[in-house]
Image (tube, rainbow, N blue to C red):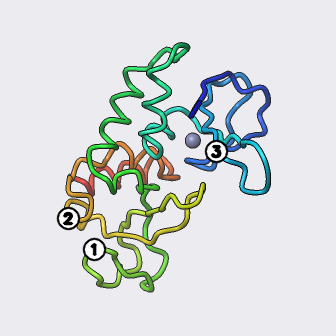
Amino acid sequence: MPGIFEAATSGRAKCRGCGQAIARGELRFGEKLPNPFGDGEMTQWYHPLCAAYKRPDVLLEALGQPGAPDGRDALEQAARGSLAQPRLPRIDGAERSPSSQARCRQCKEPIAKGDWRIRLVFWQDGQFEPGGFVHLGCRAAYFETADVLAPVLHFSKLDDAARAELTAAFA
Ligand SMILES: [Zn+2]
Ligand SMILES: [Zn+2]
């Protein structure tokens, strides 16, 4: 069985998708993976929407099984959107670049200090690895769709004013 939905039995697990704690009693999604350290399986936990964006194929498979949760239409829509282009599950939010050192994976130019950049992660061997950045303005070329505001906002750790600035920068 690839994935399960259940109410979190403690507040200790962190979501693999966003890094935030999953509150006790909150619905969580568990992906079962082979245990890399020995026999059997391990379970990696996510907020359901975080899994929809970052592990869309696994979440969709679980949604097709009995016991899928309330709100499944929104989850299914987010997962199908993320599956539409193969690079979309790499989205890990946006931030203003703290320096001019990183280069954009799309255009290969440096990302200027203070400019918005989209963080990327790559799913590899059962975990997410940091995958660099793209200019906000290079999103359409990199993701092959410009429609990435929802997942970018979802994974951005920004205050309300910065979220408003980011949303405006998309326009
Ligand atoms: Zn999460
Ligand atoms: Zn670029």
At which x and y percent is residue 142? 26, 64
> In percent of the image, x 44 and y 63: which residue is there?
119
Name the kind of residue labelled 1 in the image: Gln
Residue under the image location 56 percent in, 34 percent down = 2
Amino acid type, callout 3? Leu
Left or right? Give the position of 162 relative to 11.
left
Which residue in the structure is indicated by mark 3?
A: 33
The answer to whether residue 30 is above or below residue 93 is above
Q: Regarding mark 3 in the picture, which secondary structure is present there?
A: strand
Q: Quadrant of the N terminus?
A: top right
Q: Residues within 10 Å of mark 3 (few under 14, many from 20)?
A: some
Tell me where residue 110 appears, x and y as whole percent: 34, 84
Cβ of disc 1 within 8 Å of ligand 2? yes
Element type at mark 2: helix
Q: Quadrant of residue 106?
A: bottom left
What whole-number distance in Å separates the C-alpha atoms at marks 2 and 1?
A: 7 Å
Q: Which mark is residue 141?
A: 2
Q: Nearer the viewer, residue 102 or 143?
A: 143
Q: CA distance from mark 3 to mark 1?
A: 32 Å
| Three-letter amino acid code of the residue under disc 2 | Ala
Q: In the rendered image of this protein, does residue 30 appear above or below residue 25?
A: below
Q: Residue at x 41, y 79 (%)?
A: 113
Is the Cβ of the residue at disc 2 closer than 8 Å to that at disc 3? no
Ligand 2 has an atom within 8 Å of the beta carbon of the residue at disc 2: yes
Ligand 2 quadrant?
Answer: bottom left
Q: Is residue 60 above or below residue 50?
A: above
Q: Tag 3 or tag 2, which sits nearer the N-term?
A: 3
Give the mark nearer the N terminus: 3 vs 1.
Answer: 3
Are dots 2 and 1 in contact, CB under 8 Å?
yes
Q: Which mark is residue 106?
A: 1
Q: Residues within 10 Å of mark 1 (few under 14, many from 20)?
A: some
